[in-house]
């Protein structure tokens, strides 16, 4: 563990003081990124009103290499993409049915109720709405992770990154390690677990950990508008605070494999589709109105939250992916 991780609050104060002291023209940098952010938010809202701010592709085009440079550029600008048709309809229906049987066969809801101290003999209590189901190794999950179409999709996304520079290959875009995650099962009428806007990558480390600071050197000491969020050069060396809540594996994209159709307001994922949001968030936490040691609510061992009191201009671009 890095020495600073033993006393995170003191490290946060020290890092904030140092950056406020050493980053040249801090207010000017923030002003420029704020102007750029306003333009991007306006573009996102216009695109959303016109039919969708989140780029979409057909898997058939990905597999056949028919994705244009303009489409690639838009994905990198928006930092996200929906890829349709990775699995065929019959396969999806079969997997959905098998997952539900797997949940029932493992008595998942009854066991979850027992762990929570709920009396499962009381009608309805054992079947109370749970969305994130901590089952990781059902047959459909394993098959989906290992499917050739999934590997093709991930390799395409990996190759949107700068994965090689200066004669050094930072990662192999065509070789992937399966990432085991849970099932999310949302039932009609369910209003629970509204995920709050956040970035999963890291939190206070962005300001305190040396490799993160190198990764953001353009933001802090160069031209923040030239920061490349898809450059992997320094991302392989970053260190995060050990935590069961934060993934420490480098992922080019955080993806969801959706096995059902959803629409806006149906519980589908929401995003701020602005890849250049990080420079603004970093500089926001260093402005004079932010209390010492606060960093706009960033917490160790947690995802980096976007709060209305600090990040309202950014949240104006929060849209549903569909």
Image (spheres, rainbow, N blue to C red):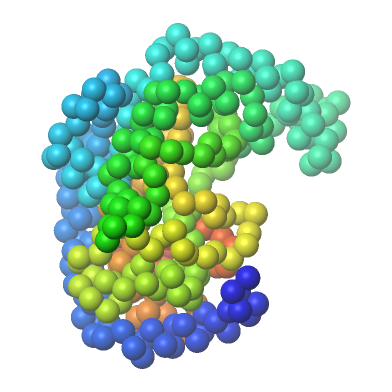
Of 35 and 235, the residue lying toward us: 235
31 to 60, vertically: above or below: below
123 relative to 95 in the view: left or right: right
Res 181 visible = yes
Residue 56: quarter of image: top left
85 relative to 8 in the view: left or right: left
Of 54 and 80, the residue lying toward us: 80
**As drawn, which residue projects farthest toward the bottom?**
21
**As drawn, which residue projects farthest toward the top?**
90
Q: Residue at x 38, y 37 (%)?
A: 174
Q: Residue at x 58, y 13 (%)?
A: 97
- Where in the figure is residue 234, as x and y percent of width and height? 38, 63
228 to 1, vertically: above or below: above
16 to 156, vertically: above or below: below
- Where in the figure is residue 290, as x and y percent of width and height? 42, 80
Q: Residue at x 51, y 44 (%)?
A: 194
- Where in the figure is residue 85, as x and y percent of width and height? 34, 20
- Where in the figure is residue 171, as x and y percent of width and height? 40, 49
Residue 1: quarter of image: bottom right
Res 45 visible = no
Residue 206: quarter of image: bottom left
1 relative to 96 in the view: left or right: right
User: Where, quadrant-wise, is the C terminus in this rendering?
Assistant: top left
250 to 256, vertically: above or below: below
Q: Residue at x 30, y 42 (%)?
A: 159
* Total marks in image: 0
């Amino acid at each position: 563990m890095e020495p600073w991780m033993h006393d995170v609050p003191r490290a946060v104060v020290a890092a904030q003081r140092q950056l406020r002291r050493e980053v040249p023209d801090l207010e000017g940098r923030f002003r420029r990124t704020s102007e750029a952010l306003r333009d991007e938010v306006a573009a996102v809202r216009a695109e959303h009103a016109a039919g969708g701010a989140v780029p979409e592709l057909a898997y058939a085009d990905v597999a056949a290499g028919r994705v244009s440079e303009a489409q690639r550029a838009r994905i990198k600008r928006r930092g996200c993409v929906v890829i349709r048709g990775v699995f065929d309809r019959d396969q999806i229906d079969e997997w959905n049915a098998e997952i539900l049987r797997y949940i029932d066969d493992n008595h998942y809801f009854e066991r979850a109720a027992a762990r929570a101290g709920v009396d499962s003999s009381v009608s309805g209590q054992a079947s109370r709405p749970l969305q994130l189901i901590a089952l990781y190794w059902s047959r459909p999950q394993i098959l989906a992770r290992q499917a050739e179409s999934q590997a093709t999709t991930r390799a395409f996304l990996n190759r949107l990154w700068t994965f090689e520079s200066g004669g050094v290959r930072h990662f192999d875009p065509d070789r992937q390690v399966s990432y085991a995650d849970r099932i999310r099962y949302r039932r009609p009428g369910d209003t629970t677990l509204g995920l709050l806007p956040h970035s999963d990558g890291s939190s206070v480390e962005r300001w305190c950990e040396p490799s993160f600071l190198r990764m953001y050197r353009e933001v802090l000491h160069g031209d923040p508008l030239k920061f490349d969020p898809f450059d992997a050069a320094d991302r392989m060396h970053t260190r995060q605070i050990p935590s069961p809540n934060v993934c420490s594996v480098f992922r080019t994209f955080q993806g969801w494999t959706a096995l059902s159709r959803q629409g806006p307001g149906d519980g589908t994922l929401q995003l701020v589709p602005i890849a250049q949001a990080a420079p603004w968030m970093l500089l926001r936490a260093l402005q004079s109105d932010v209390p010492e040691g606060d960093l706009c609510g960033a917490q160790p061992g947690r995802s980096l939250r976007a709060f209305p009191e600090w990040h309202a201009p950014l949240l104006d671009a929060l849209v549903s992916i569909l």
